[in-house]
Image: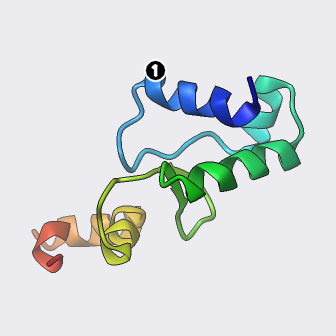
């Protein structure tokens, strides 16, 4: 089994929810005993499959499914979500 399949299985059984960040490349490499390059290639492959995306901090995040890039951007911005919460607004108010 390749590392991509290992990560896919981990996503399936770990209980990650859409929008949850994955461990860093360094943490994944250490946990599985592989190089960061291997982790990066696997995450890029999972991104191509639509299972993860990279947020603005370059973290790998579990994909939120059939949503627009704007929705993914808003979900991946905790600071923006905090600002909206302070003003009593919801991200969904700004989505089509």
Position above or below: 38 against 15 = below
Q: Residues within 10 Å of mark 1 (few under 14, many from 20)?
A: few
- SS at badge 1: helix
Q: Quadrant of residue 74?
A: bottom left
Residue at image point 89% right, 39% down? 35
Q: Which residue is mark 1?
A: 13
Looking at the image, residue 86 lies above or below residue 49:
below
- Asked whether, in this view, residue 10 is left or right of residue 89, the answer is right
- The percent coordinates of residue 27 (x first, y second) are 74, 36
Question: Residue 13 placed where, x, y %?
Answer: 46, 20
- The residue at 76%/25% (across/down) is 31
Q: Is 44 placed above or below 90 here?
A: above
Seen in the picture, residue 13 relative to 37 is either above or below; the reply is above
So how many labels did they put on this image? 1
Question: In this orientation, which residue lies closer to the viewer: 65 or 92?
Answer: 65
Which quarter of the picture shows residue 28?
A: top right
Is 66 displayed left or right of 93 in the figure? right
Residue at left 42%, top 33%? 16
Coordinates of residue 75 in the picture (x, y in percent)? 34, 62
Quarter of the N terminus within the rendering: top right
Quarter of the C terminus within the rendering = bottom left
The colour mode here is rainbow
Q: Residue 26, percent across and down?
A: 79, 42
């Amino acid at each position: 089994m390749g590392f991509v399949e290992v990560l896919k299985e981990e996503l399936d059984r770990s209980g990650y929810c859409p929008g949850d960040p994955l461990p860093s490349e360094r943490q994944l490499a250490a946990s599985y005993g592989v190089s960061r390059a291997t982790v990066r290639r696997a995450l890029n492959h999972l991104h191509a499959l639509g299972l993860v995306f990279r947020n603005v901090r370059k973290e790998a995040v579990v994909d939120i499914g059939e949503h627009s890039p704007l929705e993914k951007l808003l979900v991946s911005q905790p600071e923006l979500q905090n600002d909206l919460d302070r003003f009593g607004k919801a991200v969904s108010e700004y989505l089509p």
